[in-house]
Image (spheres, rainbow, N blue to C red):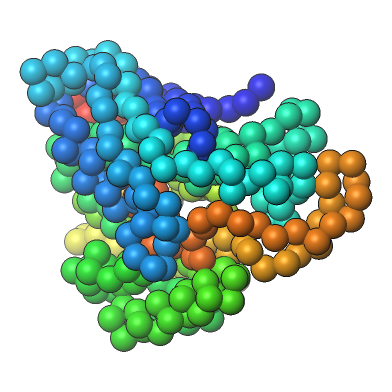
Amino acid sequence: MASNSLGQIFRITTFGESHGVGVGVIVDGTPPGLPLSEDDIQKDLNRRKPGQSRLTTQRKEGDIVKILSGIFEGVTTGHPIALLIENTDARSRNYDDIKNSFRPGHADFTYHHKYGVRDYRGGGRSSGRETACRVAAGAVAKKILDTKGIKIKAATIQVGKIKGNKWVEDFIESNPVRCADPDVEKEMAALIDGARMNLDSVGGIIECRVTNVPIGLGEPIYDKLDCEIAKAILSIGAFKGIEFGNGFEAAEMVGSEHNDAISKNGFLTNHAGGILGGISNGEPIIFRMVVKPTASIAKKQNSIDISGNEIILETHGRHDPCILPRAVPVVEAMTAITLADHLIRSGLYSKKV
């Protein structure tokens, strides 16, 4: 059976395909009395939508959200919130050439063999278009977190081999890469543009920082907060790895270096990334994610068709030469959804605002 839902109390279920009528999400478990409007949701959808610059897909979708239920007189009712985003610029004919072929690096091969049928138009459910649903739901989750002062900010910190060393938060939304380091943003943009012109793609790393997190979010043993965040993040297409705090660098450290010493005023360092034993410790939650290069590229590649014949494949259509700029708000959304669920589960959020 397909898994289309995430969360226990604050729970989302997404639906729709890349080239269908539209995509949408049912958000259940939102407490009543929370002020919420389409404008609140639209702000984040505008950050994710296609066609923002030459560095992203040129598909022209307005990504206009419609609230179908769960809101009355500007506040949540406590009942399921249904959100719909119509598809207005799908060009299914671009995919006619690959309807009987498998794109290397894409979900075409596995979807076909698992279900015996696949929606070849943009990948159907496996398309990045589905992330619009996540961003819409994440905007609702952010409203819940806002009541407790919890803030989430993600940014591109590496594209290809180009690495940033600064975190300038005010700079992130002012550049098309959503890079946090002004010193390397133009170099990153040039690398992405070069991949686009070469009919190729490039990957990188996104970092996310969550501040004002209360102590106590997360449930041992199998619902640890870092485990739940990792599941949410790795459910995003093209995300291949995640680390918290010092992450893999911890392999080269000794215990006395990695342990976060504690004083009467709190932790002296944050090598753990804000989570100990799967439970938030009150420090900022910091984690980084590896994003692979976009699978759909126009460069010729070896593949097979559904009959097993070897072919040379070119993927046409409008695809991101680098997923990172538009994935940043998706990371924030999935983080918000996970934290909102745990905030409510922990009892740290009252039932009515």
| Horizontal side of residue 259 vs 253, given as left or right | left
Q: In the rendering, at what x and y percent does residue 209 appear?
A: 32, 59
Q: Position of residue 256 (x, y in %)?
A: 48, 73
Q: What residue appears at the point 16 percent right and 30 percent down from the top-left corner? A: 36
Position of residue 154 measured from the top left corner of the image (x, y, whole percent): 34, 59
Query: How far across and down, in percent of the image, does residue 219 sit?
Result: 44, 34
Quadrant assignment for the N terminus: top right
Q: Which residue lies at the image location 59% right of the left edge and 71% below the top edge?
A: 199
Compared to 94, does 352 lie above or below? above
Relative to residue 180, is residue 2 depicted above or below? above
Residue 322 seen in the current view: yes
* Quadrant housing residue 164: bottom left
- In the shown orientation, is residue 264 left or right of residue 92? left
Q: Residue at x 65, y 39 (%)?
A: 120
Q: Quadrant of residue 285?
A: bottom left
Q: Quadrant of the C terminus?
A: top left
